[in-house]
Amino acid sequence: MPFSSGSVTPEGAGNHLYSLPPADGATFPDQRSKSYDAVNNAWTSGDPGLLNVAYTPDGGEGEVYVVGGGGDPPPGGRRPGDEDTYDPHAHRKLDHPTNNAETLIHMLKGSLGTGILAMPEAFHNAGYGLGICGTIFIGTLCTYCLHILIRSQYILCTKLRVPVLNYPDTMVAAIEIGPKWLRKFKGASRHIINAFLIVYQLGICCVYVVFVATNIKQIVDEYWRALDVRVYMLMLLPPLILLNYIPNLKVLAPFSTAANAMTFVGLGIVLYYLFGRGVPHVSERNLVGEPSHFPLFIGTTLFALEAVGVVIALENNMATPSAFGGYRGVLNRAMLIIVLLYVTIGFSGYLKYGDRALGSVTLNLPTDEVLAQVVKAMFAAAIFVTYALQCYVPLEILWKEYLVKSLQKKSPRQRKILEYVLRTAIVIATFLLAVAVPRLELFISLFGALCLSALGLVFPPLIEICVLWGGDVTAADGDHRLGPFRWRMIRGLAIMSFGLFGLVVGSYTALRDIVRSFL
């Protein structure tokens, strides 16, 4: 499931976020003016000054709330700080909310993809001992950061009197009440978040192109003749462009369901091969790998585990969002299963293939067995369909956040042509990058370290520090202050330092290996 980008700011909107929750039974002022926003997966108003930020991941239409606008706040509206007894959870009106079990399943489904298939190669970089401990540590850290992000969003929603906030809006609202020296970066923070989201999503698309082409190559090489992997990427280019021309994601819903089924079945067959015949003894594998490869392990594990955008969208669409957090909440249960699954795949894959572990464990499966080739075809087909979903996020951010306003004077036909030019350019950009560096494991590590260190480990503690900076919180969130000696701030800074370390060192190591691949 893709990240959600920032909501579209209404033309002429001011710098402050205002809100006015609808009264019970109230309807939107102009039902005819609503339009679908694929980024937030929600319906928005065409009326300047009104903006919906409700998420409906299952495709349902959410209720509309006033959360943006210029000038003075509307009658009955609130400025930040006028919390009273407003409960954001009570004001979420969704047509198709998910229950706890459905949310748990959605999180598990979102964790099964190219990331989990790369875990054996990650364990090769770390060694099985450090791989197990490191995966558990990074998984715990990611889970904790998701908790503080969700908790900070709740506090901000209470202050702003809005039911939900997406990631960029959360950052802007947090900086607005954070340290004074930081507030001057409020406007830039939205663009920074959007930039990381765009780069990350384009990175996923590059990984998908390499993944599909490499798996198809192994199949065709066995039954026909060997060709360069770039030839298969070139063959994929036209269908990927046409796939990205689909204007409505609902058209892909049946194919997405089929892709999920193929992924689950394929993963089961992969486990059969990993635990099947010929498994070496653990003494034949390294307990700790080469220290110079540790940053690659961090990047790959972050790419596989971190799903901040998915978590925000799922929590916002829950029927009982209060059950999402807590020690026995949906988030902890889902992440526990996910981490155990990743450790299992990583350890068993490294134990089976050792130094031969590749960027996807499917590439290590036998090439002379039909079942193994079927698994590769299933994963290739599933990832191919998912490519369009990943392209939607950078497309919507670039189009609605940065281009559509400058094209107001263009005719609808001209705007539509330019939109399809952008759709084509996004696919070609990911294709060219994949052709330039057809190394699956390096792509995964690079984009995991570069983007998810920031989105998952740096920004959430920063948001929490800003939210709790002044200590001016109400009784509803009074347990979440900076604490004695500002220990919560110290803890947040420590997590941010680790995230920045992963970002800088992990990105440098991946880029260094990419450069070496050209030599």
Image (cartoon, rainbow, N blue to C red):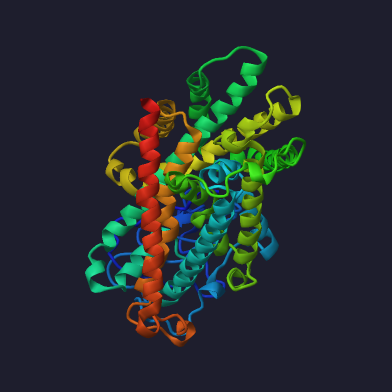
Taking depth in this image into account, of 365 and 416 the one nearest to the observer is 365
Residue occupying the far front of the picture? 283
Q: Is residue 335 left or right of residue 39?
A: right
Q: Residue at x 60, y 38 (%)?
A: 354
List x then y, in percent, for residue 486.
Answer: 36, 80
Q: In this view, does 68 lie above or below 424?
A: below
Q: Residue furthest right?
A: 277
The reply to whether residue 37 is visible in this rendering is no
Q: Where is residue 149 shown, x and y percent of the image?
A: 46, 66
| In the foreground, 453 or 315 | 453
Q: To which quarter of the image does residue 57 belong?
A: bottom right
Tell how many labels: 0
Report whether 120 appears left or right of 198: right
Q: In this view, does 393 lie above or below 420?
A: below
The residue shown at (66%, 17%) is 222
Horizontal arrangement in the rendering, residue 11 relative to residue 21 (left or right):
left
Give the image location of residue 195, x and y in percent: 35, 48
Q: Can residue 441 be seen in this view?
A: yes
Lateral position of residue 451 relative to residue 385, left or right: left
Give the residue drawn at x 45%, y 69%: 153
At 34% from the left and 72% from the top, the residue drawn is: 466
In this view, the residue farthest toward the bottom is 475
| Residue 277 image position (x, y, % from top left) | 77, 36
Placement of 51 over or under 438, stated as above or below: below
Q: In which quarter of the image is the C terminus?
A: top left
Nearer-the-camera pick, 106 or 128: 128
